[in-house]
């Protein structure tokens, strides 16, 4: 596997992790920022954020591999996708290890 695919996968995974961290920070401070929202008004922004997050993380993980696949670089596209997923698993293990140690 080429070094370019490995680093591209790492960058996509880091971008995804950074976005997830920002959303987690927003969600953990939502009451302080927005105050308590009554009834349905609490669910609408949450669900909209969920849909937008799925689109953003989907594009970070699948965007480049899909473009490569469409352009004819099928093997490299699959390798990049699997590399990105592998890096995400590595980041997950790191974060879980930190949580267990604390």
Image: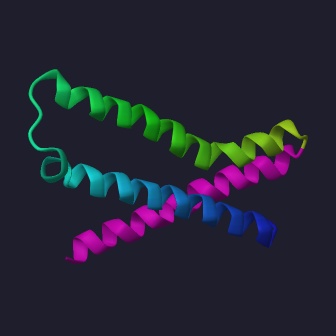
Examine the rendered structure and indicate whether residue 101 appears above or below residue 33: below
The range drawn in magenta is 73-102
Residue positioned 22% across, 28% down in the render: 43
Q: Residue at x 25, y 69 (%)?
A: 99
Q: Nearer the viewer, residue 52 or 74?
A: 52
Q: Residue at x 43, y 32 (%)?
A: 51
Check the image and report above or below for 71 versus 32.
Answer: above
Asked whether 1 or 53 is in front, the reply is 53
Quadrant for the C terminus in the image: bottom left
- Which residue in the rendered view is the most extreme toward the top? 40
Quarter of the view holding residue 8: bottom right
Image coordinates for residue 94, horizontal then vertical, percent: 40, 71
Verify whether residue 86 appears in magenta.
yes
Q: Residue 87's spot in the image, x, y percent?
A: 56, 63
44 relative to 86 in the view: left or right: left
Residue 70 lies in the magenta-colored region: no
């Amino acid at each position: 596997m080429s070094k370019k695919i490995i680093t591209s996968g790492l960058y996509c995974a880091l971008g995804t992790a950074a976005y997830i961290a920002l959303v987690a920070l927003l969600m953990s401070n939502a009451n302080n920022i927005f105050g308590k929202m009554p009834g349905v008004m609490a669910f609408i922004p949450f669900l909209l954020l969920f849909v937008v997050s799925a689109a953003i993380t989907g594009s970070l993980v699948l965007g480049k591999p899909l473009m490569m696949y469409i352009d004819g670089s099928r093997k490299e596209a699959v390798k990049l996708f699997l590399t990105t997923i592998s890096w995400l698993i590595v980041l997950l293990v790191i974060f879980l290890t930190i949580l267990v140690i604390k």
